[in-house]
Image: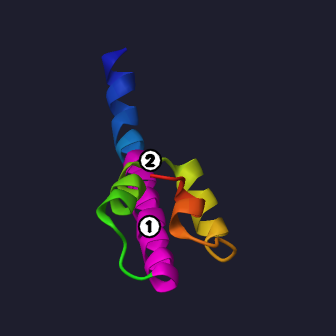
Amino acid sequence: MLAERTKKWPEQWEQRGIQKGRMQNMRETALTLLELKFGPLPDWATQMIDQADATKLDAWIKGVLTAEGLEALLGKH
């Protein structure tokens, strides 16, 4: 039983690495787009991006083009 589990570890580690890399790319994309549109970001916005899950990051990335303001997009702070 242990041997079966240990065989799956490399695959699990690879999946975790892929997920971590995807989240980092989404955060970098969100930061870049928001800074291009709104200028330097306040600390609270950067912290929100750093703590956001994939669903929120995806929504913010998609919404940046039509957002009228940073607070309107990320939520009032």
Amino acid at the residue labelled 2? Gln
Q: Position of residue 16 (x, y in %)?
A: 39, 46
The span from disc 2 to disc 1 (Cα, nearest Å) is 15 Å
Q: Name the mark nearer the viewer: 2 or 1.
A: 1
In the displayed structure, 17 sits above or below 39; it is: above
Question: Magenta span has 69?
Answer: no
Residue at image coords 44%, 52%:
77
Residue at image coords 48%, 80%:
38
Q: Specify the quadrant that holds the N terminus.
A: top left
How many numbered circles does the render carry? Answer: 2
Residue sitting nearer the eye, 33 or 74? 74
The region drawn magenta spans 14-38
Badge 2 density bin: few <14, some 14–19, many ≥20, Cα 10 Å: few
Question: Upstream in the sequence, badge 2 or badge 1?
Answer: 2
The image's mark for residue 15 is 2
Q: Position of residue 65 (x, y in %)?
A: 66, 77
Q: Position of residue 4 (x, y in %)?
A: 39, 24
Q: Say whether residue 50 is left or right of residue 75.
A: left
| Colour theme | rainbow
Residue sitting nearer the eye, 33 or 17? 33
Answer yes or no: do the residues labelled 2 and 1 have beta carbons within 8 Å? no
Amino acid at the residue labelled 1? Asn
Q: Secondary structure at mark 2?
A: helix
The image's mark for residue 25 is 1
Residue at image coords 47%, 85%:
36
Type of secondary structure dominating the magenta stretch: helix
Residue sitting nearer the eye, 43 or 57? 43
Q: Position of residue 11 (x, y in %)?
A: 41, 43
Outermost residue to the top: 1
Residue 18 image-quadrant placement: bottom left
In the displayed structure, 77 sits above or below 28; it is: above
